[in-house]
Amino acid sequence: MNICIVAGARPNFVKVAPIVRAVEKAHQQGHDVHYTLVYAGVPGDPTLEPTLFNDLQMASPDVYLGVDCVSLNELTGRVMGEFEKYLEHNDTDVVIVVDDLASTMAAAIVTKKQGKYLAHLVAGTRSFDIRMPKEINRLVIDGLSDFLFTAGEGANNIVSREGVSLSQTYMVGNILMDSLRFNRNRLQRPDVMDALHLEEGHYIVFTLNRKALVADTVNLRNMLKAIVETAKGCPIAAPLRGAARSTVQRLLTTLNDDVSRFHLIDPLSYLQFGYLTAHAKGIITDSGNVAEEATFNGVPCITLNSYTEHIETVRHGTNVLVGEDPGRLRETLTDMVAGKWKKYSLPDRWDGRSAERIVQILIDELEHA
């Protein structure tokens, strides 16, 4: 059985790495199963730091589709064209696509047009906001998929209500936990912690990526002001890049507050960032993945959004949603700084065996098909 794994952006590789290890293990155990890793982007993509694949203990992609553009519609079309060429020249039994990017949807469409089996990793996530491009991607990918691998019961219920057969849906657990458990003892303390005198358990991590949040500079300034004032001198480490970094840097200079404890730092490697967040007093983020990692590590987390596709981080974990409301952010951050936080537990099937389940399901269903 030949498995093609498609990654569209850097975060996908964190979820892909456990599958690669599981396929290699199955092959060593005598199963006729092989994989090819395809990346939609270009070699030398600046978001893929040189240490990434070494940190994840995996080989770099076998194939680069070479698509590099800003327009989502153009990207979708170009990925479809390049991936079609790939499938026409490479024997493939099943394609695994990850998450909800435009490139993910493009690969999913081509896979089904070519008559191949399609598996969607982290299926059933929804914001229920059809204005979001990613929500459209999710609906299309799940609708086309032969195998829907979900992270939890909530996602199972969503795809079931949308008419997906239970025989196609598999609750395999949260595959991000596979990587976190695998790398837990390999995390690397970043040098910047010494440079800034950051002590474990006595600093806050701030991450920002959502374009809409960065674009609303008036509200973002108010949120930054709330963070600086409420932190009460607790240092803040903000590993930001691109537009988020330049915007935050500019807005900080407009505050009539002491921002000397708000540290903009360079983006970190996977293992370094993992150490920084795992040992923080708390985290403020707009990233679902970071919120999941915070729950796993038992670190209080504030998410700058009114919803999350990973609701188990709120129901069971350490995550609290404050929307984009500076007032709610201030109130919740006050509790975080004071060490007051809700009780939490690990959600079901965050056991680090999701990739094993995925590969075994594909072997059972397709190896002798």
Image: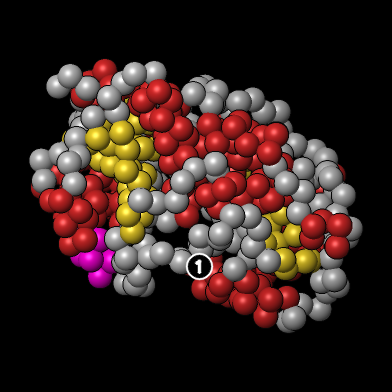
Label 1 CA crowd tier, 10 Å (few <14, some 14–19, many 20+): few
Above or below, 266 against 140 in this view is: below
Above or below, 346 against 292 in this view is: above
Q: Splitting the image into 4 quarters, where does residue 102 fall?
A: bottom left
**Residue 167: percent from the left, percent from the top?**
23, 20
Q: Which residue does the numbered mark 1 point to in the structure image?
A: 46
Q: Is residue 207 left or right of residue 69?
A: right
Stretch of the chain drawn in magenta: 73-80
Residue at image coords 65%, 40% = 294
Q: Is residue 120 left or right of residue 270?
A: left
Residue at image coords 85%, 71% = 260
Q: Splitting the image into 4 quarters, where does residue 84 fall?
A: bottom left
Quarter of the figure with the N terminus: top left
Q: Nearer the viewer, residue 226 or 7?
A: 7
Residue at image coords 56%, 72% = 242
The colour mode here is secondary structure
Q: Nearer the viewer, residue 285 or 149?
A: 149
User: Is residue 273 visible in the rendered structure shown here?
Assistant: yes
User: Is residue 306 visible in the rendered structure shown here?
Assistant: no
Q: Is residue 99 left or right of residue 273?
A: left
